[in-house]
Image (tube, grey):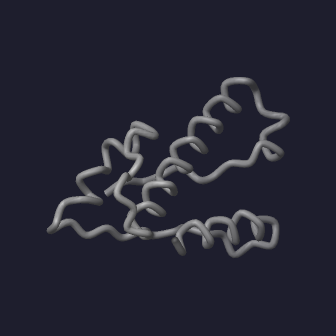
Amino acid sequence: LVDLAGNERGADNMSSDRLSRIESASINHSLFALKECIRAIGTKQGHIPFRGSKLTLVLRDSFVAENARTCMIAMVSPGNLSCEHTINTLHYANR
């Protein structure tokens, strides 16, 4: 079981301190690498870019083992203020 941090947009973090912005960039990098691996597996590409992040290296066996099963559970907010984040999360999970 892996609990991933939520996706962050730069515009939402402009008032954040430098450390928070660096953390957000790292989270986004890992989520992008995960998305690229999911896309490569889904389109049956010969090369899957597991080396894109530490996250994808750790999850590699969960994707390629014959007896492995992977399920993504997306947590979203029903609030109007989170509508854009909710839509982005649902698009991401739909892959």
* Location of residue 76 in the rendering, given as x and y in whole percent from the top left corner: 61, 69
The outermost residue toward the top is 18
Q: Residue at x 51, y 57 (%)?
A: 35
Residue 3 in the figure: left or right of residue 16: left
Residue 10 at x, y percent in the picture: 77, 42
Residue at 48%, 63% in the rendered image: 39
Compared to 69, does 19 lie above or below? above
Location of residue 45 by image quarter = bottom left
State the image coordinates of residue 13 (x, y, percent, origin top left): 78, 40
Q: Is residue 60 left or right of residue 28?
A: left
Tell how many labels: 0
Q: Is residue 76 or residue 38 the one in the foreground?
A: 38
Which quadrant, please, contains the N terminus?
bottom left
Image coords of residue 80 (percent x, y): 81, 72
Front-lying residue, 51 or 83: 51
Instruction: Check the image and name the residue furthest to the front.
Output: 46
Residue in the image at 52% along x and 68% along y = 74
Q: Nearer the viewer, residue 14 or 40?
A: 40
- Quadrant for residue 38, please give it: bottom left
Q: Is residue 24 left or right of residue 51?
A: right
In this orientation, which residue lies closer to the viewer: 66 or 17? 66
The vertical placement of 7 against 88, above or below, is above
Q: Residue at x 47, y 52 (%)?
A: 34
In the image, taking residue 87 as reference, residue 14 lies left or right, namely: right
